[in-house]
Amino acid sequence: MEKDKSDLKINGHGSSTGGKYKSVTINGNGSVSGDLECVYLRVNGQGNVKGNVKADSFKINGNSSIKGDLTAEKVKINGMTHIDGNLSVEDAETYGNINIGGDCNAEMFRVDGMFAVEGLLNAGELKLNLHGPSRAREIGGEKITVKRMGRFGLRGLKNFIWPHGHDKGLNADVIEGDDVYLENTHAKVVRGNNIELGPDCEIELVEYNESFKKDENAVVGTHRRI
């Protein structure tokens, strides 16, 4: 029963074992060893979980790392988060950086900063306002919007994603969606119903069903209607 679950609070510097809780709050520098299941997880500072996390609400103000998978209804990150496994979420909102070692599946995925997804990034809607180099192996969604915001070259943030400081905008092998708008994107294949390429895109192959437009500063190897 929900009412039987206790709360876990770490203030300052401390650690705890995993388990099932109603709410988990870390203020300072805290770590949890093992899998963690809770309704609310809040980190103000530095939080590390050495296992899988399942939560209704996951909110970070600072830095966090998860050594397994993260499953949540709502994720909001202000800072940096590294997930070794997969992210499964209804609504994800990131201001800063998120690094996912596996796949990311979401209904809504919003980034204002930078991101790296080593596997597949799939969402009903993606709104990516990028302030530095980002990447995913494959990107899929119904509506995909990628915009370059501000100046690339935030050194500390850049090194979180690209250890060698490789500034290439958004990099992906395949981007596929119903309605796609891209800026400063480098991809092998972009496929969809309606595709618009903004400035500084370099795409090897564009395949579209209904419409295709491109900025004069976008470079496309081959484009064809399918």
Image (cartoon, rainbow, N blue to C red):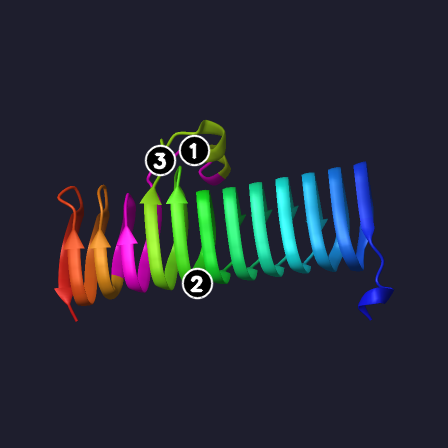
User: Identity of the amino acid at label 3?
Assistant: Asp
Q: Nearer the viewer, mark 3 or mark 2?
A: 2
Q: Is residue 188 magenta?
A: yes
Q: Please tell me how many numbered marks the rendered image carries.
A: 3
Which segment did they paint magenta? 161-190
Where is mark 1, residue-wise?
164
On the question of residue 84 being in view, the answer is no
Tell me the crowding category of disc 3: few under 14, some 14 to 19, or many 20 or more residues within 10 angstroms, Cα based.
some
On the question of residue 202 being in view, the answer is yes
Which numbered dot is residue 126?
A: none
Image spot of residue 54 (x, y percent): 67, 61
Which of the 4 image quadrants contains residue 2?
bottom right
Where is mark 2, residue-wise?
123
Which residue occupies 20% across, 65% down? 208
Image spot of residue 122 (x, y percent): 43, 63
Which of the 4 image quadrants contains residue 74?
bottom right
Which residue occupies 26% across, 65% down? 192
Most foreground residue, 156 or 2: 2
User: Identity of the amino acid at label 2?
Assistant: Ala
